[in-house]
Amino acid sequence: MSARGVLGAAPGDEVHIVVLRALPEIVPGDDLPGMLSAAAVDAGLAPGDVLAVAHKVVSKAEGRVVRLGDVVPGAAARRLADETGKDPALCEVILGESRKVVRRRRSLVVCETHHGFICANAGVDASNTPDGTVVLLPLDPDASARGIQHVLSQAAGGRVGVVITDTHGRAFRRGLVNVAVGVAGFDPVVDHRGGRDREGRMLVATDQALGDEIAAAAGMLIGKSSGRPAALVRGLVTAPAPGTLRDLVRREDQDVFRARVDDDGVVI
Amino acid sequence: MSARGVLGAAPGDEVHIVVLRALPEIVPGDDLPGMLSAAAVDAGLAPGDVLAVAHKVVSKAEGRVVRLGDVVPGAAARRLADETGKDPALCEVILGESRKVVRRRRSLVVCETHHGFICANAGVDASNTPDGTVVLLPLDPDASARGIQHVLSQAAGGRVGVVITDTHGRAFRRGLVNVAVGVAGFDPVVDHRGGRDREGRMLVATDQALGDEIAAAAGMLIGKSSGRPAALVRGLVTAPAPGTLRDLVRREDQDVFRARVDDDGVVI
């Protein structure tokens, strides 16, 4: 528990989510950290703020954009295309981003990415991209987040957190939510057990996925169109830490929903 | 798309989450809607606000509290207790709240509740409760939300939304997040496709689980201790609707992660 208060809870019990002004269309090589920093400063950036930014602009700045016309689909991609009705070149890109395909039904292809995320199309995004191109997830989203965090923390004169977000579907529940796919500057999973709130009550919450809650909170406002990709979340108390997406990814051998089970659902 | 703006996006591009003042320990029969309304009015309640409230106080007010000493475990509960090391009476309560047990590993019991939620212990909560008792989910959380919504909307002089929250684990990702287990007053799943943002950009987001994002956002601040169970989320644009948790629950036959699959993960 931080000396400043209960992690996740604001000292003033109030959190503000402020959308940053629109950015121009991002192209490979753009100084995205500088652009985000300038917009964040205009919005009053201060130490302790957490910047949430949609992965798509990060990926575009890093050149993680593929022209499907340049892709030569292999045999596995052509087979996947036959079975799903998807473009063979898109299937080649999806398979290249995947450790494996975990579920398929008709055109739905859910993959485990090289980062360990379980998501549709291995995070390859064909919406709101220049014609004939697709946008991939950053190769190393934590490194992307650290790059942004470094520039913003310098501008703020103190530690700022960064979350890179993507919209994922879920097992069991309908609709998409924004989750954290890259983290820098704070612990994205918090164990409150044994702490006390400011009125002295014992805390019982354990393993709060604060990084994902921040992503979901910002997701109420950002990422619906290309022009408003980032927001500041201010008023939270976070634990200073390098931060990593690995804390939010459940390993397959820890996941009862990817385990082999008997007819009673018992993991075997 | 609402005439007032893009659903989920604030007209002012800013959302505030304001924790309500502490409530006394809630006991069965308390007028929780009235207590929440008074606290919300003190926090400046206005039409358009969404109140997020942790289910535990709702359940307590509704008497959804069971004294384990009063429970006689049946054969199935005694078997589950043997296999998991849990209290047989607790197992009886968990099974009573469940349509079925979907996964088990050691002491972990993940159930499908009668509402359709997939969560540990069927949502039965033994933490932060009076000794020897457990708190169940509300029988009809949408009805609970409607009851609160009615009183708050009257106090606000206009439509207020309500989300009842619980903390759930997830497949694939570590840590717990707050999700909506009851909804009133707005559509918890939003399809933005075909809309435009206020700068005229086409929107691409589809089926945003806004109800869950609101729960996660409020979850950054509420529910960690018994005393601060509710927050106002203000500045969102929501679609007026009765609202229901059913829009957020994926039916088993629509869920590729509960389907039978072949060795390649293809749903069969």
Image (cartoon, coloured by chain):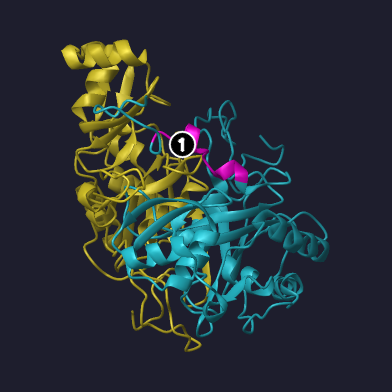
Chain colours: A yellow, B cyan
Q: Residue A167: within the magenta?
A: no
Whether residue B66 is visible to the viewer of this picture, yes or no, is yes
Segment colored magenta? B246-256
- Residue A244 position, x and y percent, is 23, 56
The quarter of the displayed image where residue B105 is located: bottom left
Query: What's the residue type where badge 1 is placed?
Result: Gly
Element marked by disc 1: loop
Q: Is residue B250 above or below residue B107?
A: above
Whether residue A61 is visible to the viewer of this picture, yes or no, is no
- A110 with respect to A176 (left or right): left
The quarter of the displayed image where residue A90 is located: top left
- Tell me the quadrant of the picture where the N terminus of chain B can be found: top right
Label 1, residues with CA under 10 Å away: few <14, some 14-19, many ≥20: many
Could you tell me which residue is drawn at 27 percent across and 70 percent down?
A: A240
Q: Residue B251: within the magenta?
A: yes
Could you tell me which residue is drawn at 30 percent across and 44 percent down?
A: A262
Q: Is residue B120 above or below residue A181?
A: below
- Residue A34 position, x and y percent, is 30, 48
Could you tell me which residue is drawn at 73 percent across and 46 percent down?
A: B242
Q: Nearer the viewer, residue B133 or B54?
A: B133
Residue located farthest toward the bottom when viewing the structure as drawn: A200
Tally of marks = 1
* Chain for disc number 1: A
Residue wearing tag 1: A227
- B28 with respect to A129 (left or right): right
- Residue B165 position, x and y percent, is 56, 61
- Residue B214 position, x and y percent, is 55, 54
- Tell me the quadrant of the picture where the C terminus of chain B can be found: top left
